[in-house]
Amino acid sequence: MSAVTAGYDTCPVYAPVFGYMGAASCMILANFGSAWGTWKAGTGVCKMGVNYPSGVIKNIVPIVMAGVLGIYGLIVAVIITQAISTPSGDGTTTYSLYSSYAHLAAGLCCGCSCLAAGGTIGMIGDVGVQCFGLKASGGKRAWSTGEGANPSEAGEGAGTMDVAVTQEASNKLYVGLLIMLIFAEALALYGLIVALILSQSQYTCKN
């Protein structure tokens, strides 16, 4: 039998359930946030590519930042699963409820933070890259002016605009977009740090 303290079972056989729930919730929520951010930002980049094809690669940053969120969840999930001890032959386990609750909290902390960050990155990326494309193109559509991916290859019917002015204005908007994305990504980083601290809180029952 596992240790009993003041009538309370410290290391019951069901304790690993909460630990694995923490690992699963961390991975699922983090991947959901990553997919959400990639979906929203990706559709925004595709829409922006219609007006300003040459800015597609430059505005791929929100998609990359959203993809990193899944890595945060993977790191915490691996740490939690490696900390869960296997039961012995007689059905007892040294994995305590204290450790399982700490691992559950760590998984939810990182997972929910990545979910919130993914939604924020997706929304900002969707609107931001489209506004950048409109600002850089001066409101003109590349497919209607014949500019294509390279403005220098524009045909005779291409619209004339002050390229220097539009590029300067779009670059200012791009800097603000990056700052917003960085602070949105920081939300997930905060959750990762706290989750790593929580995952180190363990109590092991003696055999």
Image (cartoon, rainbow, N blue to C red):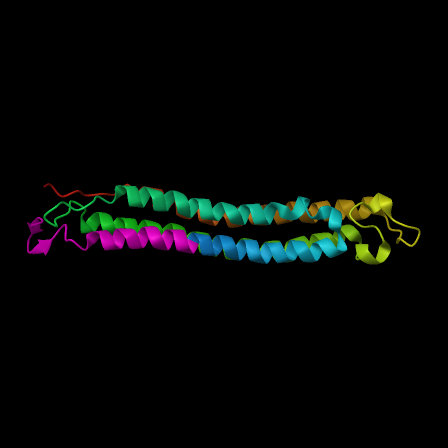
Name the image quarter holding residue 29. bottom left
Q: In the displayed orientation, state which residue is furthest to the right.
A: 156
Give the left or right position of residue 40, taking residue 131 as reference.
Answer: left
- Tag count in the figure? 0
Q: Nearer the viewer, residue 114 or 85?
A: 85
The location of residue 191, given as percent across then percent down, is 40, 48
Q: Magenta region: which residues?
A: 1-29
Q: Give the residue at x 50% y 45%.
A: 68
Give the left or right position of residue 181, taking residue 93 as reference.
Answer: right
Residue 140, can we see it?
A: no
Name the image quarter holding residue 75. top left
- Check residue 161 for magenta coloring: no
The location of residue 78, given as percent across then percent down, is 35, 43
Q: Up-down: is 39 above or below 196?
A: below
Give the left or right position of residue 30, taking residue 176 as reference.
Answer: left
Q: Give the residue at x 63% y 49%.
A: 177
Q: Give the residue at x 79% y 48%.
A: 166
The location of residue 154, given as percent across then percent down, is 87, 48
Which quadrant does the C terminus fall into? Answer: top left
Q: Give the residue at x 20% y 45%.
A: 86
Give the left or right position of residue 195, taking residue 124 as reference.
Answer: left
The location of residue 115, given as percent across then percent down, is 45, 55
Residue 22, can we see it?
A: yes
- Check residue 14 for magenta coloring: yes
